[in-house]
């Protein structure tokens, strides 16, 4: 029997046994907050991760997106993104198509999406491939990602609260700020594994 066979046999034995009881006695959230305080914490932590946070209401969203996308020639759009969010004139809108190649996506200047939810305590945005978010790769290849979060409906305090609402069978992408890494000298380089620029719009938080 090879080492691989022994490892797989152990996994099978463990998987076929009784479900272990996992203690859930940790804090579900660190403190009690109002919805406004939760939104403020989310904004602070997103900013700490070098995302740029904007607050607006429904009427202010189209002009805000027009300003954020002013330098873009092409913008990738998920299939169910509300059309009234986007500028009536300006960049060419590119539909999210399954047949799009990575090279084609790399030529797109920006992408605008919604989200599944956002976590205030960690400053994290979660995407699950929903109709207003599109496929995972459209948020990883373009250099500029604009993500709209509906506040307070899509904001939770903590990771435990988020996990209770997310479907684990969906393709979950967890985003905490723009993509970045550091070399041995601790020099930060952004845009290595995803968008170099992350603009987050808190919709309904004024």
Image (tube, helix red, strand yellow):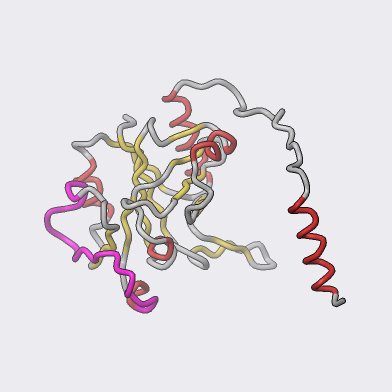
Residue 143 versus residue 47: which sits nearer the camera? 143
Task: State which quarter of the image contains the C terminus.
Answer: top left
> Does the magenta run of residues contain 74?
no
Q: Residue furthest right?
A: 1
The quadrant in which residue 3 appears is: bottom right
> Residue at (41%, 68%) from the top-left corner?
141
Give the total of numbered labels. 0
The quadrant in which residue 9 appears is: bottom right
Q: Tell whether 93 sits left or right of 128.
A: left
At which x and y percent is residue 100?
32, 74
> Residue at (74%, 33%) from the top-left corner?
23
Task: State which quarter of the image contains the N terminus.
Answer: bottom right
Residue 47 versus residue 30: which sits nearer the camera? 30
At which x and y percent is residue 54?
35, 41
Q: Residue furthest left?
A: 89
> Residue at (55%, 20%) from the top-left corner?
32
In this rendering, the answer to whether 20 lies above or below 32 is below
Q: Tell whether 5 sits left or right of 97.
A: right
Residue 163 in sight in this render: yes
In this rendering, the answer to whether 41 lies above or below 62 is above
At which x and y percent is residue 187?
61, 63
At which x and y percent is residue 82?
22, 48
> Does the magenta run of residues contain 101?
yes
Residue 23 versus residue 69: which sits nearer the camera? 23
Residue 72 in sight in this render: no
> Residue at (75%, 52%) from the top-left corner?
16
Residue 67 versus residue 194: which sits nearer the camera? 194
In this rendering, the answer to whether 101 lies above or below 51 is below
Look at the image and give the residue range highlighted in magenta: 83-103
């Amino acid at each position: 029997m090879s080492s691989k066979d022994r490892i797989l046999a152990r996994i099978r034995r463990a998987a076929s046994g009784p479900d272990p009881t996992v203690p859930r006695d940790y804090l579900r959230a660190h403190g009690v907050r109002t919805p406004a305080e939760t939104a403020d914490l989310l904004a602070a932590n997103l900013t700490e991760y070098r995302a740029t946070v904007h607050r607006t209401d429904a009427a202010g969203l189209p002009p805000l997106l027009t300003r954020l996308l002013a330098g873009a020639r092409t913008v990738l759009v998920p299939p169910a993104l509300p059309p009234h969010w986007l500028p009536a004139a300006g960049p060419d809108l590119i539909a999210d198509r399954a047949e799009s190649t990575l090279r084609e996506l790399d030529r797109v200047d920006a992408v605008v999406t919604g989200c599944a939810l956002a976590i205030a305590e960690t400053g994290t945005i979660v995407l699950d491939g929903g109709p207003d978010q599109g496929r995972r790769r459209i948020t990883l290849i373009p250099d500029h990602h604009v993500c709209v979060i509906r506040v307070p409906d899509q904001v939770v305090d903590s990771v435990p609260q988020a996990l209770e609402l997310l479907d684990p069978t969906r393709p979950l992408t967890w985003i905490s700020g723009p993509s970045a890494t550091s070399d041995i000298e601790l020099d930060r380089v952004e845009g290595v594994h995803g968008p170099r620029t992350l603009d987050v719009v808190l919709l309904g938080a004024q």
